Image (tube, rainbow, N blue to C red):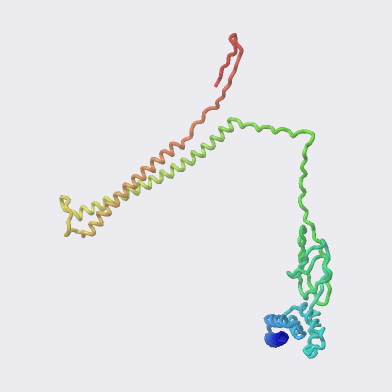
């Protein structure tokens, strides 16, 4: 008895929950339809369409089906609109259909007037047919494709065949036919390999060794190219030597100038450094002395660098001189019989 009571209570709770959920869904559906109609009356059927689609997903009733068909027709989707309007009119006793039947019938007539049919036939069998970016089947198609009255892009493709694209104008209320035969892509013929079974293949002929003059000429060209590169490097190092020596000279002159100014303005006769009373202050004298030391040091570096670059340039010029090639040499060994045996002599 207790178990039966618990089952009855559970069934009652489930019924109440389902009734509450149904009322909640119905309220949401009506709110979605109201919002969609508000956007349609405002002249924006495109943004209104998602509200009717959501209401149709929540409750597929004759009312939501008819409302969705009207919204699709207003948004420019006559094929989908005709499908949903026909489905809604299949339940003529529904209160919403009874009330708006004439309006739904008129809308269905308008939708069908904006729909044309396209029958596609051709080869090869199994080729994929895509219309306006949507796959509609494979050849041969079992029925014509319903399309809105405007230009339709048809693509037919199959492996191993050339793709075919057609732009077909569709007129409302008319049937159009399109025949497509794809061309097969021919593969390049492969050359048959012939194998001789009766006689062995001829032995390869050894390549003739290059003659001595060709080798000498090749080596001479390499040597000339190497010498040209060395001479270029020698000129570069020579230019660097001149620049470094010039920098050393300029720094040496600057050092002498600062030394002369220091001796004239910061020392007394006898070499004693003046502390005050001279034309330069102690700090200015110290600056002249530091500048002299610095310029003298860097001038030595410039002279040393210039000397090193000059030596390198000279070495490169010497090594870039062409090496005289030895005259063509030949060797020969001859042998002749004598009284004492065999006599051989070599000529070089």
Screen quadrant of the C terminus: top right
Answer whether residue 288 is visible to the viewer in this image: yes
The correct choice, above or below, for 237 with respect to 155 in the image is above
301 sits to left or right of 347: left
Residue placed at 46% from the left, 43% from the top? 232
Q: Extreme top residue here? A: 339
Q: Position of residue 109 (x, y in %)?
A: 81, 83
Q: Position of residue 72 (x, y in %)?
A: 74, 80
The correct choice, above or below, for 85 with respect to 323 in the image is below
Please identify the quarter of the rendering in which residue 289 is found. bottom left
Answer whether residue 22 is visible to the viewer in this image: no
Q: Position of residue 197 (x, y in %)?
A: 79, 36
Please identify the quarter of the rendering in which residue 304 is found. top left
Q: Nearer the viewer, residue 243 or 68?
A: 68
Counting every numbered tag in the picture gives 0
Q: Position of residue 279 (x, y in %)?
A: 20, 59
Residue placed at 65% from the left, 33% from the top? 207
Please identify the quarter of the rendering in which residue 309 is found. top left
Q: Extreme front residue here? A: 1
83 sits to left or right of 305: right
The correct choice, above or below, for 280 with respect to 338 in the image is below
Q: Nearer the viewer, residue 348 or 143?
A: 143
Screen quadrant of the N terminus: bottom right
239 sits to left or right of 42: left
């Amino acid at each position: 008895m207790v178990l039966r009571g618990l089952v009855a209570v559970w069934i009652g709770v489930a019924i109440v929950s389902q009734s509450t959920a149904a009322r909640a869904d119905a309220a949401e559906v009506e709110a979605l339809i109201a919002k969609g109609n508000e956007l349609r009356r405002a002249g924006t059927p495109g943004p209104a369409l998602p509200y009717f689609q959501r209401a149709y997903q929540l409750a597929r009733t004759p009312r939501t089906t008819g409302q969705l068909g009207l919204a699709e027709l207003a948004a420019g989707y006559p094929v989908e609109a005709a499908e949903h309007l026909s489905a809604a009119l299949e339940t003529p006793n529904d209160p919403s259909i009874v009330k708006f039947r004439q309006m739904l019938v008129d809308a269905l007539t308008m939708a069908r007037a904006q729909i044309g049919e396209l029958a596609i036939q051709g080869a090869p069998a199994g080729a994929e047919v895509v219309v306006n970016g949507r796959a509609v089947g494979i050849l041969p198609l079992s029925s014509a494709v319903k399309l809105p009255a405007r230009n339709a892009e048809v693509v037919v493709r199959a492996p191993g065949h050339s793709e075919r694209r057609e732009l077909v104008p569709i007129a409302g209320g008319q049937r159009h036919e399109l025949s497509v035969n794809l061309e097969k892509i021919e593969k390049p013929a492969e050359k048959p390999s012939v194998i001789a079974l009766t006689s062995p293949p001829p032995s390869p002929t050894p390549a003739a060794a290059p003659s001595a003059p060709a080798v000498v000429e090749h080596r001479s060209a390499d040597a000339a190219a190497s010498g040209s590169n060395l001479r270029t490097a020698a000129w570069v190092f020579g230019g660097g030597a001149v620049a470094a020596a010039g920098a050393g000279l300029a720094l040496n002159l600057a050092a002498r100038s600062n030394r002369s100014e220091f001796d004239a303005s910061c020392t007394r006769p006898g070499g004693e450094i003046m502390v005050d009373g001279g034309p330069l202050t102690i700090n200015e004298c110290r600056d002249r002395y530091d500048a002299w030391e610095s310029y003298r040091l860097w001038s030595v570096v410039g002279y040393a660098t210039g000397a090193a670059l000059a030596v390198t340039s000279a070495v490169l010029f010497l090594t870039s001189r062409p090496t005289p090639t030895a005259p063509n040499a030949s060797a020969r060994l001859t042998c002749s019989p004598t009284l004492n045996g065999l006599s051989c002599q070599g000529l070089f």
